[in-house]
Image (tube, rainbow, N blue to C red):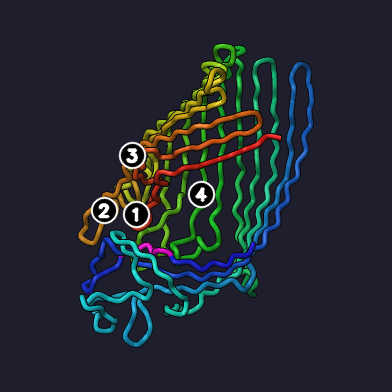
Amino acid sequence: REEKLFEHRTSNAFAVDGDGNEIPNLMGMQIINRETKDIANNLTSYFNMNLNTSNIEHKVLVGFDYIEQKRPNGSAALRARRYRIVDGSVGNYNPNNKDQFVLDNNGSPIPNVPHFDLENPQYFLSYPYEYIYDPKTSYTPTKYYTYGFYIQDQIKWNDLQLLIGGRYENYNDVVNYTKDNEEIVSQDKFLPRVGLVYSLNNATNLYGTFTQGFEPQTASQLEPEVGGPFDPRSGNMFEVGAKSQFFDNRLDVNIALYTITEENILVNANNPENPDLLRQIGQEQSRGIELDVMGRVTSNFSITANYAYSVAEITESNIPEEEGRIKPNAPEHQGGFWAKYLIDSGSFEGIELSFGANFVTERNTFDTFRLDRNGEPFNLKLPGYTIFDAGIGYTIGKFKLGIVVNNITDETHWIGGYSYTRLFPGAPRTFLFSTGYTF
């Protein structure tokens, strides 16, 4: 994989005035010019075997996989950012040394890349030669490889099915790759997996499952400069539920209750003096319930609906105030529905009408509890929203036309975000026209 990237993007910080105070309607900008090359090799191999012992059926799976990825010498990046200095260079603005910086008529520092005005956005042509670039950053060559052995047996006895399996995962990071002091750092773990399905009757199956996960830290996250070394990320999930069909299979209902526990999650330490500094949260836990309903009311009218209730909170942290807080971007309630009706007779035969909605409740961000320069919380929470969609289609013979209107009310909403400088808006009202022909 080769990447050649030239982009304007925010610097994840607001502009500042001559006194160093943030200007909330102006976003700092930067230019990134990056060229990288990555080489990956993958191997997956497995075989199945079906066995019968008395009245018990076995489906045995045994496998091995290998993944290798490396970035050779030659990958590099250039950045243009920060503020102009009178000697022709650039640097991070310091109000205590404002006489060293180029200032505008209001006494504010002039940015290397023009700020973006959130209240009055304007878009200009820009050219690479107009900016002052930091010294070229050459990416350190990297290499890692990981392999795993796994085996599982799916056992069926009458109305009971049992799945038992395990996987051994071994991850190896080559530190100081291509150098004389090259070293291999290994992380490994055995991951069990258990599943159970019981057919209560012809319409209802009960199930339960338990599995573990493992995500090693890369070499760059083991360095002291970013706060390392860190322990591998791990987790487990336990889920129970039921799947049922009613009214001659015209109504499907699925319900699930789950608990997901994750340990050693890496997050940014929010250290202004070292923006790359990381820290680990001891444990996060998500618990909730999900409900899905799919109904075929008649042969030409169907409806699907879903709802999820979840509490995702930090349960262990080296910062006591964090314990009990709801994780960023984790709504407590979310759900939606979609209905379709096909007119199958009369003058309007072939017309299909559809309508639906989805909603998400309020969510925290990383800035919900982070303190500003005055020691006060930013208190940034993303508001909940409800989006309505509708569509109409017409089928005649093998030809079909359709139009879907998403976000009918043109609701301004935020689908996610981390801070005031990193928010992700949802799409405004959009129209999608489609046409198709079946051969």
For the point 47% across and 61% down, which residue is it? 228
Residue 220, relative to residue 89: is it above or below? above
The three-letter code of the residue at mark 4 reads: Arg
Quarter of the rendering occupied by the N terminus:
bottom right
Q: CA distance from mark 3 to mark 2?
A: 18 Å
Residue 326, relative to residue 297: is it above or below? below
Q: Are marks 2 and 1 in contact (CB under 8 Å)?
A: yes
Secondary structure mainly formed by the magenta segment:
strand
Q: Which residue is mark 3?
A: 384
Q: Which residues are magenta?
A: 9-14
Task: Check residue 378 in the rendering and tell me which mark sits there, or answer none.
Answer: 2
For the point 35% across and 48% down, which residue is it? 365
- Image quadrant of residue 83? bottom left
In this view, the residue in front, 415 or 381, is 415
Q: CA distance from mark 4 to mark 1?
A: 24 Å
The three-letter code of the residue at mark 1 reads: Ser
Q: Which residue is mark 4?
A: 233
Sooner in the amino-acid sequence: mark 3 or mark 4? 4
Please check the rendered image and state whether residue 10 is part of the magenta-colored stretch, yes or no.
yes
Q: Which residue is mark 1?
A: 419
Q: Does residue 248 appear left or right of residue 282 in this picture?
A: right
